[in-house]
Amino acid sequence: MDCVAHLASLGHRDIVYIKDTRTYSAARKLSGFYRGMEQAGLFAGTESVMETEKGIIGGITAIRRIREKGIPFSAIVTGDDLSAAGAIKGLKKLDMVPGRDVAVTGFNDSLLAISTDPELTSVNSLPEKMGETAVAILSLVLEGEDPPQSTLVRPKLAIRESSSPFSRHKE
């Protein structure tokens, strides 16, 4: 949702999601994409999601398929930094400039996010914070205290060069 909200705030309306796995996590990310599109008042139909294989090759392949199908897009959201790196590479193969012609976002805020050119806007799910929270809850249980009913660790969006405001002159 955060990626879509960020991209929508920059004026993007044609946002495509690259889905590269069929895991529980991937389903949750896709659900977040749809919720983000709905909250932003944007349409997300069947062409708004491009399924592909996992990894850099999957990102490259997805960009090629999106272009071949003539799907309009000014921004790409991916469920993983590897797929986003592939999307960046795929855009370059089509003589498009990632971060200028098309905004790209990833997920995990891995070292890859700062290794791509341009550097990747990516969701940091704060795994260290989740671990610390889990240990704190376990400590409460071991001490005989009642743990909280629910605990929420909100991810943070690391905004970098790969996401840019929409411009009609792109593409």
Image (cartoon, helix red, strand yellow):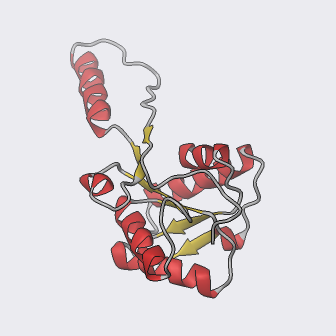
The quadrant where residue 20 appears: bottom left
Q: Can you say whether 164 is above or below 9 in the image?
A: below
Q: Is residue 40 left or right of residue 68?
A: right
Please state the horizontal and vertical placement of residue 57, each as a whole percent of the image: 36, 79
Q: Residue furthest front?
A: 169
Vertical side of 24 occupied by 83: above or below:
below
Query: Quick check: 19 left or right of 14?
Result: left
| x 66%, y 68%: residue | 48
Which residue is nearer to you in this view: 125 or 104?
A: 104
Identity of the residue drawn at 63% across and 66% down? 170
Residue 39, horizontal then vertical, whole percent: 72, 43
| 93 lies left or right of 113 | right
The residue drawn where x is 68% and y is 73% is: 47
Seen in the picture, residue 19 relative to 65 is either above or below; the reply is above
What residue appears at the point 56 percent right and 58 percent down from the top-left corner? 30
Query: Which image quadrant: the C terminus?
Result: bottom right
Q: Is 1 drawn above or below residue 100 in the view shown? A: above
- Tell how many labels: 0
Q: Position of residue 156 (x, y in %)?
A: 43, 36
Q: Nearer the viewer, residue 50 or 26?
A: 50
